[in-house]
Amino acid sequence: MKSLISPAPGNVRLRAQYEIAILKEVTLAGYEKITSVVGGRGSDRLPDSDFTYFIARGDPSGAFGQIGEWSINSYELVSRGVTKLTSSGVDLDGGGAGGIADIVWDGTEVSSGGLSGLVRIPSMDAEPGSLPELAFDYDAHFPEMGDSTRGNFYAAVTSSDNFSKLRIYKNAADGEVKVEWFTYRFTFTPKGFGFQDPRDIVLAVENGVTVAYVSAVRSVRSGTSFKLVGTVHRVPRNDVPGSRDFKTLSPSPYVVANWDPSSEPAGRNNPQQLALHDGRLYVANGDVIVRVDPVTVTKLPVCVGLKGATGLLLSKDGSQAYVTDTEKGGRLLSLKLNPSTGMYSVEKELVTGIGRTGFLEWADDERTSFYLPLPDGNEVRRIGDLGAPAGITSQTLLSASTGGPNKPYSVSVLSNHRLLIVSDSELGNLSMEISVAPGVLVMGIGLVPFTFINQDSGSPNAGRADTSGTSYFFQVNNVPFGGWLNLMINHEGAYELGARYYQVRFLQDGVPVSVSNGFTDAKWNATTARWEMVSTSHVALGSLAELYPVRSPTELWYNPYFGAEMNSTLLKNGVRTLVVTFFDAGGNPIPGASFERILRIDNNRSSLSLSLPVIGGRDQALTCGALQYKLKTDEFLLDYKVSHPTGDAIYSLSIYGGGRWLPAPISESGRVGDAAPPKVKTVYDIIGDCNVANVYIRLGTEVRVTNGYWWIYGNATDLSFTLVPDSVPLH
C-alpha cells in the first residue's frame, strides 16, 4: 500500500465542528454544505487539478443541463488590483474600472456603490476561506473618508455575490485615494452549456486539450414527434487562451455514441456512468456495458444481461469491473473479464436491496475500495476490502440522518481526507479528519489513533491497528506494527495539566526498554519568518533520565503532535506494552498521567525466489538474453516461492508477454499462504501469435505490517528475457 499522505509524523489535524461520529478518544468526519445546485449528478477531477467538474441538470427535466466547475480550495481568486478611486467607481469583480461599480469616491468620502455587505477587518491577512463567515452589515455603509496613509481594511460582498478583502488608503506620494483588493468566488461556475438530461462526466487530456465526455439523453425530432436518444458527447475546451470553458453544443453536438430507440433494443437509450480505460470509453447503459472508441466512433457491448445499469468502475488493468443495476431492489456486482472474448461476466453479487445508486468513485490509488452514493437511501457508503478472502466491507460514511445531504449522486476525491459530495440540490464538503477529546495525552502511532489499536490483551488481534469500520481516510485492517514508529503526543493538553517532561518506555518480558532517540521537526521562527529544522533530544532531571520536553503552546511546530521516534526492531516480535509517563517541572509525576498502551510488533520479513522457466522440459541458461522453444504448445513451467513467518503478507505475480500484461489466470495475486507454484502454461499462453517476443515477470510481496503511515517490508524480484524459436540461431 502506498503512503496515503506525506509521511510527516504529525499529519493529523484537529477539527472542532461538524462532528458526526463520536468515539471514545477522537471525533471523525464532518459534512458541511458549500453551495446550492439544481440537479447535481456525476463529477470528475483530473489528477493534480485545482478544479472538480460536475453535472448540474438545471431543472427537474434536465433541459438546461450544464457542466459546473468547483475549486478544491472552496474558493477561486477572480480579481485583484490596486487603482485610484474615482467618481466612476471600481468593479471589484471585474478588475477595476467598468462593470458595476462596487465602491465610489465622490471627492470627500467613499460610498458602497453596488456592494451588498460590508464589515471592518484588522488587516489584509484574513484567510480567504474565512470571509463568508464574517458578520456583514448588509446595509453596506462605509465610514470611510480616505484620509489614512496606513489604510483601513474591509471585507465586502460584491455586486456579483463574491467576497472581497480590500484596503482603502491615501497614497502619501501623490495624495490620491486608492483601493487595493482581492476578490474570491465561493460559488460554482458554469463552464459548459446546452446539455439535455445530462448524467455523468469524465475528463481526459487528449493531444494537450482537455475534453469532457458527458452521458445524456437528447430529444431528437423524428417526423412530427420526438424520440429520446441516448448520447455520449465529447466536448473539448474552447480555444481562448487561459479559458477553462468548454465549447457549446451548437452547431456541433460533439457526439461519439448514440443509442436510437428505433434501432436499439429496448432500454438501451439510458447511458449513465462513464469510465475511461486505455483510451476507450465504457458506458453503463440499460442491460449492457458498452465500449466506445472515440476515434472510430464505434460501440460494442462487452457485458450483457444487466437491468438498469447505473454505476461503473474498472480496475487499473481492466480485468475487473464493478457495476450497479436495479435488479433485486438495487444491487452491486463484480464483473470479471474473459481475455479471450473481451467480454465481462458477473462474478459475484456483492450487495442487494440498496435501491437506486449514484456513480461510483475509487477511494484510493490502489483501487481496493470505492465510494457508493445511494440517492434513494440518502447516504454515501465506502465499499472496501475488494478481493479479500473474507469478502467486502460496506460502511456508511455519511447519511442525511447524521447531517449529510439528501439524494447524493457522486463523490469527487479532493484529497485523502476531503471529499466533494455532489447531491441533487447542493455541493458539500466531507472532512475525514480527527479531533482529540480533552484529557487525551497519548494519541496514537503515526496516523493511527490508539482508539483504533486493539487494547484487549486477551484478543487474538491485541495490539493490531484497525480503522476499517470508520470513515477515517487511513484504512488498515487488523495489522501489526513494525520499523520506526512515531508516537503522537497531545503537547498542548499535557502543558495545560502542568506537565513539562515525559518519558517513553516499552515493557518487554517485564523489563523496561527506554526510548531515547532524538528527532527533528520544523519549528516556525517568527523573526526570520521561516520554518527551521530543530532537533529534540532527551534530557536528565535529577535521578530521572531520558526525558523529552513537552512543547509550549506558544511554539508553532509543523507536526504539532510529534512526540518520539521509536525503533521497534530493537524489540522482540509479539505484543509489547508502551508506557508514557508525564512529569512536572520539578520531576514529579503528574497524578493520573501515566499511560499504558499495547502494540503488536512484527518485524518479520518475507522471502521470495523466482527461477527461469523450464520450456518444453528443458532447463536453459540465458543466451544473448533469450530462451528458445520448439513449438507454441511447449510447456512453460515457472517455479517461484513466497513465504512469510506469520502469513501477514500478500504476493503478486505479474507476467507480461510481447509488451502486454497477461491477466489472471496467468498473472495472479493473493495471500502468501495461498500461492501454489509451479505455474504450468504453454508458450502460446505467454506470447500468443508472436514468434519472437520479450517476456517480463515480476514477483513481489507486500507485508501487511504498518509503521503508522504505509506498508513496510515489501520485497520484489523480476526476470526479463526474449522467447525465440529454436530454428533461429542465437549466434
Image: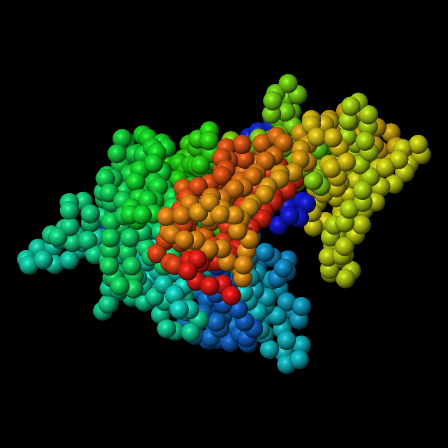
List x then y, in percent, for residue 276.
36, 54
Residue drawn at x 37%, y 51% as measured from the top left: 632
Residue drawn at x 70%, y 30% as measured from the top left: 573
> Residue reaching furthest top?
458
Q: Nearer the viewer, residue 240 or 131?
A: 240
List x then y, in percent, for residue 205.
41, 63
Q: Nearer the viewer, residue 206 or 730?
A: 730
Looking at the image, residue 209 lies above or below residue 705: below
- Left or right of residue 671: residue 635: left
List x then y, in percent, for residue 630.
41, 53
> Residue reaching furthest left?
224
> Total of numbered circles in the picture?
0
Residue 679 seen in render: yes
Colour theme: rainbow
Q: Nearer the viewer, residue 38 or 252?
A: 252
Residue drawn at x 35%, y 56% as measured from the top left: 689
Name the image quarter holding residue 161.
Answer: bottom left
